[in-house]
Image (cartoon, rainbow, N blue to C red):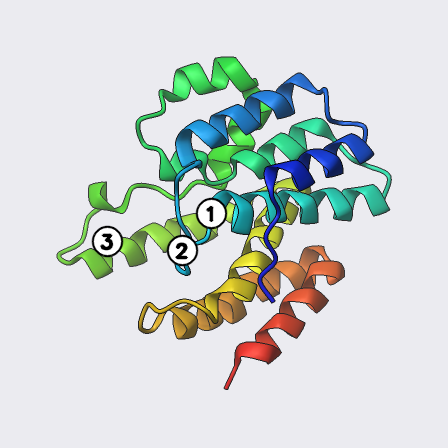
Amino acid sequence: MVVLVSMEKFVEELNEAGLGEDYRIRDAINQVIHSQGSQRADDGNLQIEQHIFPVTCEVMQYFRIRGKLDPEIVATALLHDVLEDDRSIDEEDFRERFGLRIYNNVKMLTKLDWRNLPGKTDMKKKAHRDEIYFVELEKASKEVLIVKLADRLNNVVRVGSSPEKGKKERYIRETIEHYLPLAEKHSQYFCKKIRYELDKIID
């Protein structure tokens, strides 16, 4: 079931976690609103409410259970798509604004622009991009991988409602081939959740 998290609800979650006044998180929210605030998901809902805030809440829940809630990881979760979705961002300015750790985390979660990669067709260029991405993701820290697994969990939950032909099948295949092995290795918490959601959408 797709769950929407409004700005008001997200702020409540931050305040409950004692992070409502953290400057890194406030700056991350402002950046997300600027870069992705009007972006729509496949079903027409705001992407920020259907994906970005829910993913961040999932990451917060995971680390709160373990007593390791880190504001820079919360900011990473908020910003995990921003460099990929808003190519107008000056990365040097982004690094100075958010610091090297957050920048490196978000950069690790950002796929290369497929248009600049070798390949005779768009499909081959995108396949090359994904191959590079998954190789690099294997080198990511546990914390960054948790953000990525929360991101994939949310995508799996939502993909069943996508009208795009072939998207559900592509996400299922990609999740089984790449993300479940990562979850099995690094987080049984997300492994169980992703398997559960996959079982609901696999025909």
- The part of the image, by quadrant, that contains residue 75 is top right
Cα–Cα gap, marks 2 and 3: 28 Å
Amino acid type indicated by mark 3: Lys
x and y, in percent, of residue 170 in the image: 39, 70
Q: Element at badge 2?
A: loop
Q: Which mark is residue 201?
A: none
Q: Is residue 19 above or below residue 193?
A: above
The residue tagged 1 is: 47
10 Å crowding of disc 3: few (<14), some (14-19), many (20+): some
Give whichever of 92, 132 is nearer the camera.
92
Cα–Cα gap, marks 2 and 1: 8 Å
| Residue at image location 61% in from the left, 57% down from the top | 3
x and y, in percent, of residue 83 in the image: 41, 33
Cα–Cα gap, marks 1 and 3: 26 Å
| Residue at image location 46% in from the left, 53% down from the top | 45
x and y, in percent, of residue 141 in the image: 63, 40
Quadrant where the N terminus lies? bottom right
The residue tagged 2 is: 44
Residue at the outermost left position? 120
Amino acid type indicated by mark 2: Gly
The residue tagged 3 is: 125
- Kindly check if marks 2 and 1 are in contact, taking CB atoms under 8 A apart as contact: no
Give whichever of 83, 120 is nearer the camera.
83
Q: Element at badge 3?
A: helix
| Residue at image location 40% in from the left, 31% down from the top | 35
x and y, in percent, of residue 81 in the image: 46, 40
Q: Element at badge 1?
A: helix
